[in-house]
Image (spheres, grey):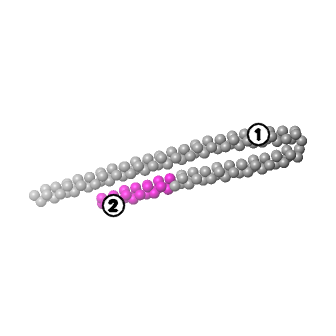
C-alpha cells in the first residue's frame, strides 16, 4: 500500500511537471507568435507608408508648388503617426512580454514549491512507514511474550 501511495505521488508529480512544461512551452510559443505578428504588422505599415510616400512624391513632381507643400505635410503626418504607432506598439509589446515572463517565473516558483511539498510528503511517508514497522515489531514481540 505504501508503494502504491508513493507511486501515485510520483505520478502526480510527473504529471504536474509535464503540465508546467507544456504551459511554459505554450507561453513561449505565444510570445513568439506575438513577436511575429508585431513584425508582420510593422512591415505592412512600412510598406503602406512607402507606397503612400511614392505616390505623394510622384504627385509632388507632377503638380504645382501648392501640391508640393500639401504632400510634404502629409509625409510629416505619416511619419508622426508611424512614430506614435511604433512607440505605442513597443510599449504594448513590452507589457505583454513582461507579463508572460512574470507568469513563467510564477510557474517556476510554483513548480519549486510543489517539488518541496512532494519531497516533504515523501519524507513523512518514509518516516511513518518506519514508525509503523517498528510498532509492528513491538506488537509481535509483545504478542510472543
Left or right of residue 45, residue 59 in this image: right
Q: Which is more toward the observer, 49 or 65?
A: 65
SS at mark 2? helix
Left or right of residue 69, residue 139 in this image: left
Tell me what residue is drawn at x 54 percent, y 44 percent: 98
Labels in figure, total: 2
What separation in Å lies between label 1 and label 2 (alpha carbons)? Answer: 73 Å
**Magenta stretch bounds:** 1-24
Residue 94: x %, y % from top left = 58, 44
Q: Quadrant of the C terminus?
A: bottom left
Q: Which is more toward the observer, 131 or 67?
A: 67
Q: Local crowd at mark 1 within 10 Å, few (<14), some, or many (≥20)?
A: few
Please tell me in which quadrant of the rendered image residue 89 appears.
top right
Q: Which is more toward the observer, 58 or 14?
A: 58
Left or right of residue 43, residue 25 in this image: left
Residue 13: x %, y % from top left = 40, 55
**Marks 1 & 2, CB-CB < 8 Å contact:** no
Tell me what residue is drawn at x 61 percent, y 41 percent: 91
Magenta segment, prevailing SS (helix, strand or loop): helix
Q: Which residue is mark 2?
A: 4
Left or right of residue 22, residue 5 in this image: left
Amino acid at each position: 500500500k505504501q508503494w502504491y501511495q508513493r507511486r501515485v505521488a510520483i505520478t502526480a508529480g510527473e504529471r504536474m511537471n509535464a503540465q508546467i512544461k507544456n504551459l511554459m512551452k505554450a507561453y513561449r510559443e505565444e510570445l513568439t507568435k506575438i513577436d511575429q505578428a508585431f513584425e508582420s504588422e510593422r512591415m505592412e505599415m512600412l510598406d503602406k507608408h512607402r507606397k503612400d510616400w511614392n505616390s505623394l512624391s510622384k504627385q509632388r513632381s507632377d503638380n504645382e508648388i501648392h501640391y508640393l507643400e500639401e504632400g510634404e505635410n502629409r509625409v510629416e503626418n505619416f511619419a508622426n503617426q508611424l512614430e506614435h504607432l511604433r512607440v505605442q506598439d513597443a510599449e504594448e509589446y513590452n507589457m505583454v512580454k513582461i507579463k508572460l515572463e512574470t507568469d513563467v517565473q510564477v510557474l517556476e516558483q510554483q513548480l519549486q514549491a510543489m517539488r518541496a511539498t512532494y519531497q516533504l510528503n515523501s519524507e513523512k511517508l518514509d518516516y511513518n512507514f518506519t514508525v509503523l514497522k517498528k510498532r509492528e515489531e513491538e506488537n509481535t514481540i509483545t504478542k510472543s511474550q
